[in-house]
Image (cartoon, helix red, strand yellow):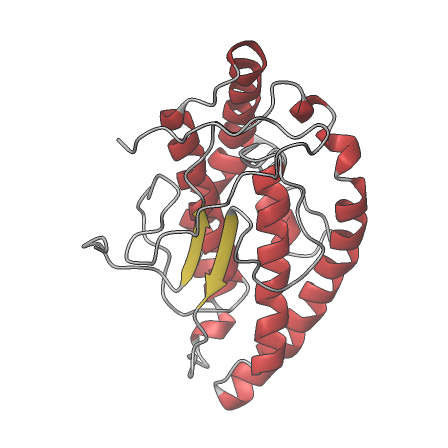
Amino acid sequence: MTDSRTSYPLRVEGAPDPEAVSRGLWLVKPLLLVPHLVVLLFLWLAFYAVGIVAFFAILITGRYPRGLFDFNVGVLRWSWRVHYYGYGALATDRYPPFTLNEVADYPAHLEVAYPERLSRGLVLIKWWLLAIPQYVIVGIFVGGGLWFGAHGSFGNDSWAAGGLVGLLVFIAGIVVLFTGRYPRPLYDFILGMDRWALRVAAYAALMTDQYPPFRLDQGGTDPGSTPAIPTPPPPSGVPGAPAPVAPAPAA
């Protein structure tokens, strides 16, 4: 059964098993993520270049070229998987795949509905003027990284490295370190803030004309969408694989 609230064109989800994380792996994830961060640096540079081309295409034709749109969705998807594994959520120990495509059995999912038509007028003002209230809120959630990441400092992948998300993820890491459990309410709240930030990112990147709702949709399942595909536990006998833990029941 779907949520009665209106879904947003961007769907951000996480599989509901936030307790299946090891106690200490999060301490070394900065090193483990270096290959992804190098690749994402170049992907985000391409993301900005594609956005500039899309800006003029929308202004002239009212359409976002489908191939360019799919590429930028892939960059957002890749980034979300890295953040879900790393310090945007710290919610899985499964290493993110190196792909722009959706991976059904990975615990983090992102999709954006392709818009057949976009407003030629809104493209001139929505990414800076109309989105200002959203930037203020997102700045509280994730720090200033989203603004600079979306508006041309350089192709960084640090939008979820600060703010309230960064603080709560650090607290979650400490709790996991001492208890081996990721508190479900904390997970749900962090996912809600990540979801809000990514909705704003998609809007600022001209991928939708639908204004992001002022609504914190918490939990792993995005309202009005199909639940994320549960991720099977790693095969037994794999060195270093954490023992599977049953997910906590939904509140």
Q: Is residue 219 left or right of residue 107?
A: left
Q: Quadrant of residue 32?
A: top right
Residue occupying image coordinates x 56% and y 41%: 84
Residue occupying image coordinates x 66% and y 78%: 53
Residue 178 in picture, x, y percent from top left: 55, 9
Q: Quadrant of residue 208?
A: bottom left
Q: Is residue 24 left or right of residue 202?
A: right
Is residue 128 in view from this perspective?
A: no
Residue 203 in picture, x, y percent from top left: 47, 62
Is residue 180 in view from this perspective?
A: yes
Outermost residue to the top: 178
Residue occupying image coordinates x 66% and y 25%: 26
Outermost residue to the front: 237
Residue 34 in picture, x, y percent from top left: 80, 40
Residue 95 in picture, x, y percent from top left: 67, 42
| Position of the C terminus by quadrant | top left
Against 67, is 224 above or below? above
Q: How many labels, in total?
A: 0
| Position of the N terminus by quadrant | bottom left
Question: Relative to the observer, which residue lies in front, 114 or 219?
Answer: 219
Q: Quadrant of residue 235?
A: top right
Outermost residue to the bottom: 61
Question: Relative to the observer, which residue lies in front, 30 or 212?
Answer: 30
Residue occupying image coordinates x 51% and y 21%: 172
Question: Relative to the observer, which residue lies in front, 94 or 220?
Answer: 94
Against 47, is 131 above or below? above
